[in-house]
C-alpha cells in the first residue's frame, strides 16, 4: 500500500477547516487524479501527503511508514522517496535549469557531492535525459527566469522524474500549458510512471484531461471526498454536483452579486 | 546516432575565474601578512587579557564623569556643526552638478548637451575629490593648520561630508520625476524656482533621510578623528589608551556605544516624524 | 494641524541645536577665516603644491599602495566569510537562542569603529598590515553580517522548503534554494564595503597598521609636505581605481 489515510482531517491555524474525514487507500503503481472546485482542498491534501502539513486528526501512512512518528532524520529519508511538484515551481530565477533539475537528487547525495555539483554539474546526461522526456533538452543551460510558466512547470516535472521517487504528487502540473501541450505532458508523465512502477497522484482543474488520462478519479469538494470512481462510472450529475457554485448566478443578464475570486493555490 | 558530448558552457569561465582568484589570493595574503594565529598566541592573548582585565572596574569618579560629559557634548557639537557647514557646501554644489536643472537637456531628450556636461564636470570632480580623501586625513591636515581641538574636526567633517551629501543630493535630484521641473523650465521660470517647486517637494524626504543617516555617521567619525587630535570623545580615548588607563577606556567605550545607539534612535525618530 | 506645528517645532529645535553647537565649541569663524590665520593655512597648503616624484619615493609608494590594496581586499573577503557564517543564525535559521547571540555579536563588532579595533589589535598583535587586515575584517564582518542577515530574511523561503520536501539536508537546501536568490545582493554589499575599506585601510596606517596610511602619518609628522602630497595623490588614485573596479564588477556580474 503506497498511501493510506484514515479519518484524516486538517484545520489551519486560523481555524479554517481544509480537510475532514478523508479515507483514502492508494496501492503501489496506481495513477489517481484529484479533481474539484477551487479552494476544495486539493493542494492541502497533496501537501499533507508530501508530509509538508501535519494532519489535525486521523492517521496517515506513506510508503508503509507513519511520517509523524519518525524522527526528523528518518522523515527526511522518507521524503527523499516522495516527490512533490508545485503549480508554480519555486525555482530561483538566476539558477540554471540543469542545476534545478539535478537538485532533485539532493536527498540522495552526500553533502560534499551536492556542493561540488554547484560548481560543476556532475550528471549532465541524466539531467538532459529527464529534460528530453519533456521536450526541453535545448534549455539545459538556460536560466530559469528566461522560461515561460509552462516551461517552468515542465522543469519541475523533470526534476521529480530525475529524483526517481516511489510516489509522485503533482499539484496542477499542467495548469500553465495550452491544451495540446498539457495533454502531451500528462501522457509522458503517465508513461514514465507506469514504466518505472511509481505511484502517481495528480490534482487537475481540467476535468477532460483527468478523465482522459487517469484510471481512477477522486472528486474533492469542501474538504471531503465526494466520489472515488473510474472515469467511465462518473455521471454528469456527479460532476455538476462537484462543481456547483451557488454564489454564481445562472443568468448572464443579471448582475453577479458575489464574484467568486479565482483561487490559485500558492505553495 | 551518437549524441555529441555535453559541455557545460559555464565550465571554462568558472575555471578561469577560480584560477584568477587563487592567483590574486596568494600575493594578497603575503602582502597583508594575514595571521589569525596572533590573536590566540600565548603572549598576545595574555597582553589582550591584561588589557581587557584593566577595563574593570570602570572609572566613575566625579572629575572623570564631568570630563566624560563634556567630551560627549563636544563630540555631538562637532558632528552637528560639521554637518551644518557641510549642508552649506553641498546644496549649492548639488544644484550646480545635477543634471536635473539642465536647460539643454530639455531639447536633447533628457540628456544635456556635451558642453553642458563638460561645464558640470569641475563641480562633480570637486565633489569626488572631497569624498575620496578620508575625513581623518583632512582632520590631520587641519590639526596641523589650525592646531589641536574641535575646529579641525568640524572643518574635516564639513569638507568630506559636504562632498558626500553633494553627490547624493545631485543623484536624488536626478532620480525624481523630471516632468514638473521640466514643465516649469519650459514655461520660462528661473532654475532656482523650478528647483524649489518642481524637484524639492519630491526630493525632500529622501534628502532628509540621507542627511540624518549621515549625521549619525558624523558622530562616529568625530570620535575617530579625535584620535588624531580633533577633540571630543576620541581624543580622550586616545589619551587614556596611551596611559593604559583601562577603566577610563572602558567607560568611554561604553559611553560611545550608548551614544551611537541614541543617535540611531534619534535618527529613526526624526525620519519617521518628518517624512 | 498639530502635526504641522510639531514639525515646525522640531525644525526650530534642530536650528537651535546647530547654533548651540557652534557656540559651545567656541569656533570663531571670523578669526578662522580672517587675515593671519588664513595666510598661515595658505603657507601650509603651499607646501603640498609641489609633490615629490622621485623614483625612490614612488617605489615606496607602490609598495605601500599594494599593501593597502591587499589589506582592504583580504579584510573584506574574510569579513564576508565570517559575516555569512554569522548571518545564518542571525536570520533565525538556527533557532532563537542562536539568533539573539549572533545579533549581539554582530552589533558589538559593528559598533566599534575600525580605528579602535586597529588600536586594540596593534596592542595585541603588534604593528604592521596584519593588524589593519584583522581590524577591517572584524568591523566589516559586523556590518556585512547584519546586511546579509537582512537579505536572508527577505529571501523567499519556498525554494529551500521545496528541496527539503524532497529529502534534502539543511545546508544543501540553503545552497540550492536560498543562496542563488540572494547571491547578487551579497556580492553587491561586499563590493560596496570594499570601496569603503580601501578608504579605511589608508586611515588605519595612522595607528601603525602599515600601507599608505602609515607613510602619510610619518611624512606629516616629519613636516615633509611634498612627500605627503604624493602619498595623498596615490591614495586618491587607489580609491578611484577600486571604485571603478567595483562598479564594473557589479554591473557585469550582479545586474539582476
Image (cartoon, coloured by chain):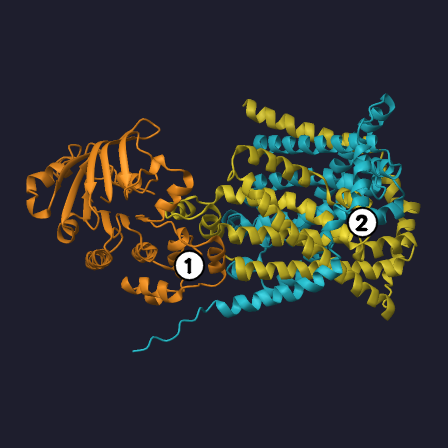
Q: Would you identify the image quadrant in which residue B234 lies?
A: top right
Letter of the chain shown yellow in the rendering: C
Q: Chain of mark 2?
A: B
Element type where label 2 sits in the image: helix
Q: Residue at x 15, y 39 (%)?
A: A243
The answer to whether residue A263 is seen in the rendering is no
Q: Residue at x 31, y 43 (%)?
A: A50
Q: Residue at x 62, y 31 (%)?
A: B270
Chain A representation colour:
orange
Q: Residue furthest bottom?
A: B1
> In the rendered view, does A202 fall on the left or right side of A91?
left
Chain B representation colour:
cyan
- Residue beneath label 2, please? B138
- Residue beneath label 1, please? A99
**Image quarter in which the N terminus of chain C is found:** top right
Residue B247 to residue A145: above or below: above
The answer to whether residue C109 is seen in the rendering is yes
Locate residue C75, reporting x and y percent.
69, 53
Q: In this view of the protein, which residue sits in the foreground, C3 or A95?
A: A95
Locate residue C216, reporting x and y percent.
84, 55
**Is the Cβ of the residue at disc 2 closer than 8 Å to that at disc 1?**
no
> Circle 2: is it few (<14), some (14-19), or many (20+) Cα within 10 Å?
many
Amino acid at each position: 500500500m503506497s498511501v493510506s489515510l484514515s479519518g484524516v482531517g486538517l484545520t489551519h491555524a486560523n481555524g479554517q477547516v481544509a480537510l475532514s474525514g478523508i479515507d483514502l487507500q492508494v496501492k503501489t503503481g496506481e495513477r489517481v487524479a484529484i479533481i474539484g472546485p477551487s479552494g476544495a482542498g486539493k493542494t492541502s491534501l497533496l501537501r499533507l501527503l508530501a508530509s509538508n502539513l501535519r494532519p489535525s486528526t486521523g492517521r496517515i501512512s506513506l510508503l508503509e511508514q507513519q511520517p509523524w512518528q519518525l524522527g526528523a532524520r528518518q522523515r527526511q529519508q522518507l521524503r527523499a522517496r516522495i516527490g512533490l511538484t508545485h503549480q508554480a515551481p519555486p525555482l530561483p530565477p538566476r539558477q540554471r535549469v540543469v542545476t534545478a533539475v539535478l537538485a532533485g537528487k539532493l536527498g540522495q547525495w552526500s553533502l560534499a557531492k551536492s556542493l561540488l555539483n554547484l560548481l560543476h554539474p556532475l550528471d549532465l546526461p541524466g539531467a538532459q535525459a529527464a529534460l528530453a522526456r519533456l521536450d526541453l533538452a535545448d534549455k539545459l543551460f538556460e536560466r530559469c527566469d528566461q522560461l515561460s510558466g509552462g516551461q517552468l512547470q515542465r522543469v519541475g516535472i523533470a526534476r521529480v522524474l530525475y529524483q526517481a521517487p516511489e510516489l509522485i504528487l503533482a499539484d496542477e502540473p499542467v495548469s500553465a500549458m495550452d491544451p495540446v501541450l498539457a495533454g502531451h505532458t500528462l501522457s509522458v508523465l503517465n508513461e514514465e510512471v507506469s514504466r518505472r512502477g511509481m505511484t502517481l497522484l495528480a490534482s487537475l482543474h481540467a476535468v477532460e484531461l483527468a478523465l482522459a488520462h487517469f484510471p481512477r478519479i477522486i472528486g474533492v469538494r469542501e474538504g471531503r471526498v465526494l466520489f472515488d470512481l473510474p472515469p467511465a462510472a462518473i455521471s454528469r450529475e456527479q460532476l455538476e454536483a462537484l462543481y456547483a457554485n451557488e454564489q454564481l448566478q445562472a443568468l448572464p443578464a443579471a448582475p453577479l452579486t458575489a464574484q467568486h475570486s479565482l483561487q490559485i493555490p500558492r505553495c | 546516432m551518437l549524441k555529441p558530448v555535453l559541455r557545460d558552457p559555464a565550465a571554462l569561465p568558472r575555471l578561469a575565474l577560480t584560477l584568477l582568484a587563487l592567483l590574486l589570493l596568494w600575493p594578497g595574503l603575503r602582502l597583508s601578512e594575514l595571521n589569525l594565529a596572533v590573536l590566540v598566541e600565548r603572549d598576545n592573548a595574555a597582553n589582550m587579557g591584561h588589557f581587557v582585565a584593566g577595563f574593570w572596574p570602570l572609572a566613575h569618579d566625579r572629575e572623570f564623569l564631568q570630563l566624560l560629559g563634556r567630551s560627549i557634548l563636544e563630540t555631538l557639537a562637532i558632528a552637528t556643526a560639521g554637518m551644518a557647514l557641510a549642508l552649506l557646501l553641498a546644496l549649492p554644489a548639488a544644484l550646480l552638478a545635477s543634471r536635473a536643472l539642465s536647460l539643454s537637456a530639455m531639447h536633447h531628450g533628457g540628456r544635456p548637451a556635451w558642453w553642458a556636461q563638460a561645464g558640470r564636470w569641475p563641480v562633480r570632480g570637486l565633489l569626488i575629490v572631497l569624498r575620496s580623501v578620508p575625513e581623518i586625513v583632512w582632520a590631520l591636515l587641519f590639526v596641523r593648520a589650525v592646531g589641536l581641538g574641535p575646529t579641525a574636526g568640524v572643518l574635516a567633517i564639513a569638507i568630506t561630508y559636504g562632498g558626500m551629501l553633494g553627490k547624493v543630493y545631485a543623484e536624488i535630484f536626478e532620480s525624481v520625476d523630471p516632468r514638473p521641473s521640466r514643465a516649469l523650465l519650459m514655461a520660462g521660470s528661473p532654475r532656482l524656482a523650478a528647483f524649489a517647486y518642481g524637484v524639492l517637494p519630491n526630493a525632500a524626504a529622501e534628502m532628509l533621510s540621507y542627511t540624518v543617516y549621515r549625521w549619525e555617521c558624523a558622530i562616529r567619525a568625530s570620535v575617530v578623528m579625535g584620535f588624531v587630535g580633533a577633540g571630543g570623545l576620541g581624543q580622550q580615548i586616545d589619551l587614556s589608551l596611551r596611559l593604559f588607563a583601562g577603566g577610563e577606556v572602558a567607560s568611554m567605550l561604553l559611553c560611545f556605544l550608548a551614544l551611537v545607539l541614541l543617535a540611531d534612535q534619534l535618527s529613526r525618530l526624526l525620519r519617521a516624524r518628518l517624512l | 494641524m498639530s502635526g504641522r506645528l510639531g514639525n515646525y517645532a522640531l525644525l526650530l529645535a534642530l536650528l537651535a541645536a546647530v547654533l548651540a553647537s557652534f557656540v559651545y565649541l567656541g569656533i570663531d569663524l571670523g578669526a578662522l577665516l580672517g587675515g593671519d590665520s588664513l595666510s598661515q593655512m595658505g603657507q601650509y597648503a603651499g607646501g603640498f603644491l609641489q609633490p615629490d616624484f622621485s623614483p625612490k619615493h614612488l617605489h615606496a609608494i607602490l609598495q605601500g599602495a599594494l599593501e593597502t590594496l591587499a589589506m582592504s581586499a583580504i579584510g573584506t573577503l574574510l569579513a564576508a566569510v565570517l559575516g555569512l557564517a554569522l548571518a545564518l543564525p542571525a536570520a533565525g535559521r538556527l533557532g532563537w537562542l542562536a539568533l539573539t547571540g549572533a545579533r549581539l555579536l554582530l552589533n558589538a563588532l559593528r559598533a566599534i569603529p575600525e580605528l579602535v579595533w586597529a588600536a586594540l589589535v596593534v596592542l595585541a598583535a603588534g604593528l604592521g598590515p596584519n593588524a589593519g587586515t584583522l581590524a577591517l575584517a572584524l568591523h566589516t564582518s559586523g556590518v556585512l553580517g547584519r546586511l546579509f542577515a537582512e537579505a536572508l530574511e527577505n529571501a523567499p523561503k519556498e525554494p529551500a522548503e521545496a528541496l527539503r520536501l524532497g529529502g534534502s539536508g539543511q545546508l544543501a537546501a540553503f545552497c540550492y534554494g536560498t543562496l542563488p536568490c540572494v547571491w547578487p545582493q551579497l556580492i553587491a554589499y561586499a563590493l560596496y564595503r570594499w570601496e569603503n575599506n580601501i578608504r579605511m585601510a589608508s586611515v588605519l596606517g595612522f595607528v601603525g597598521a602599515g600601507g599608505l596610511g602609515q607613510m602619510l602619518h610619518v611624512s606629516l609628522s616629519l613636516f615633509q609636505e611634498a612627500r605627503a602630497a604624493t602619498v595623498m595623490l596615490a591614495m586618491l588614485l587607489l580609491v578611484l581605481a577600486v571604485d571603478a573596479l567595483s562598479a564594473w564588477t557589479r554591473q557585469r556580474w550582479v545586474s539582476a
